[in-house]
Amino acid sequence: MKVKRIHFVLLLLVLSITNAVSQQKFGITITPNHEDWTYHLGEQVQFLVTITEEVPSNSTFSVHYEIGPEKMPPTISKKIQVKGGRVVLEGGTMRVPGFLRCKVTVTNGEESHTDIATAAFEPEAIEPTVSLPADFTNFWQELKNLHKEIPLDLVMTPLESKSNEQTVFYHVSFQNFEFKNRTYGILTIPRKEGRYPAVIRFPGAGTAPLGGNSVIADKDVITLDIYIHPYPANMAPSFYEQLAQTTLPSYMFFGTHDKYAYYYRRVISGCLRGVDLIYSLPQFDGKHLAAWGSSQGGALSIITTALDKRIKRLVVLCPAMCDFTGYLHDRAGGWPHFFSPENRAMYEKSEVIQTLAYFDVVNFARFITVPGFYSWGFNDETTPPTSFYSAYNVIKSPKQLHIIPDGRHKIYPEQVKMTYAWILDSFTVK
C-alpha cells in the first residue's frame, strides 16, 4: 500500500514538473537608453527589451514591435525571433517636439505579454494646435455673471458615519447657474473652532463620486469634493453603476454642437460655485484655497483656477481635455479623443471644433497666474503626454514638475505624498 502511495506521489510530482516546463512564465520590460527617457531632436533612441523567465530556458521568443509618435500609426513595424534575455531595438528619432512610443508584444507558445515605453523629445517645446476664441473671456464671464443672480442656497447634511473626533463630514447641495440645476459634493470641516485653509478636489472621469478627503481633512483643512453630475453624491454604489450604464455612459460627448449646450458648461459652473461655497463658510480663513485633481479632475483644476482668482494654488496630475485638435494635425490629441481615427468621422465638424475651443484646457492654461504642482508619466495612453504638455507649456506662472517616466494613467503613492506636502506647505506661506 505504501509503495502504491509513493508511486502516486511521484507521478503527481512528475506531472507537476512537466506542466511547469510546458507553461513557463515570463515577463517583459522596455526602457529607453536615456535614464530620464528624454532626448534632443534628431538624437537616436534605442529601446531595451528585457525578457525575464521564472525558469531559465533556451526558448525562442517571437517579438513584434511597433515604433512611432504616440497615438499615430507606427513608422516601424517588425517581427523578430530572440533567445530570451535582452534585445536592443533601434527606435530612430523625431524632428519635431513630441513623444515616440515603442510597443512590444513577446510571445512564447500560448503565453503573450505586451508593454510600452515612450521617449520624450524636447517636450517643453511642444506648442498647442488649438486657437483661443476671440470671445473666450466674455463667454465665461457671462456664465459667472449668472451666478451673481442666483443664490447659493447651500444645504449641508451631516454624515455621521464618516465623521470622526476631528472632522465633520457633510453631504452638500447648492445651486448651479439655473434654479432647478444643483451641484453636489462631500464637504469636511474641522470640529474645533477656528478659521482654516481649504482644498477643492475635482473628480476623474466616470459617474462614481469622491468620498471626502479624509487624509488632508485631519490636518485642520476644510475640503470639498465636487460631484460633477446632477445627482446626490451619497447614494448607494449601485446607483452610480446604473448611471454609467444608462443615463451617462458617454456624457463627455453630450452637446458638442453648441458651446451653450456642451455638458461641461454645467460642470464648470458647478466647480465655480464650489469656490463660492468655500468662501461662504465662516470657518474658512478667507485666503488659502487650493485646487487639485487628476485626469478629468486635473483639467477641472486648471479650468476653475483660471476662471476664479480666489484659488491661490493648484495641483494637476495627468490632465485630460488638452489640445483636442492635435489629431487634426497628425499628432495625439487630448481625452476624450474626439478626433482620433475611431471618432473623427463623427466629430470632425466645424461646429464641434468651434465648441471645443471654449473647453480646451490649453485655453484656460493661458490664464493661470498662481503657482502649481504638476505630475505625470510618459506611458500615459489615456491622456497623451503630447496633449498635456501643450497646456503645461503655455502656463507662465511658477511651476513645479514631477515626472514618473514609466508612469501610466493612474495616481502613484509618491504623487499623493508630494501633492499633500506641497499643498500643506503652501498654507504655511503668509
Image: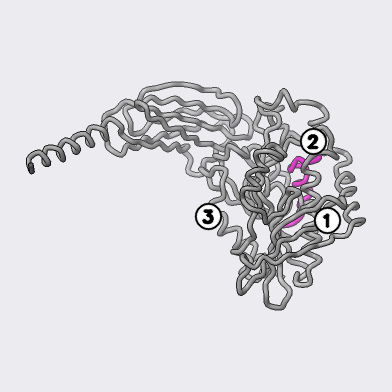
Dividing the picture into quadrants, the one containing residue 94 is top right
Q: Determine whether 415 is above or below 168 in the image.
A: above
The N terminus lies in which quarter of the figure?
Answer: top left
Residue identifier under label 2: 255
**Tally of marks:** 3
Give, as a three-letter code, the residue at label 2: Gly
Residue neighbourhood size for the residue with mark 1, other residues' Cα within 10 Å, grouped as few (<14), some (14–19), many (≥20): many
Give the residue at x 87% y 48%: 143
Residue identifier under label 1: 175
- Whether residue 124 is visible to the viewer of this picture, yes or no, is yes
Q: Determine whether 43 is above or below 427 in the image.
A: above
Outermost residue toward the bottom?
193
**Residue 413 image label:** 3
x and y percentages locating residue 319 in the rendered image: 66, 45
Cβ–Cβ under 8 Å for marks 2 and 1: no
Q: Main secondary structure of the magenta part?
A: loop
**Along the polypeptide, which appears first: circle 2 or circle 1?**
1
Give the residue at x 65% y 39%: 245
Dividing the picture into quadrants, the one containing residue 109 is top left
Tell me: 30 left or right of 135: left
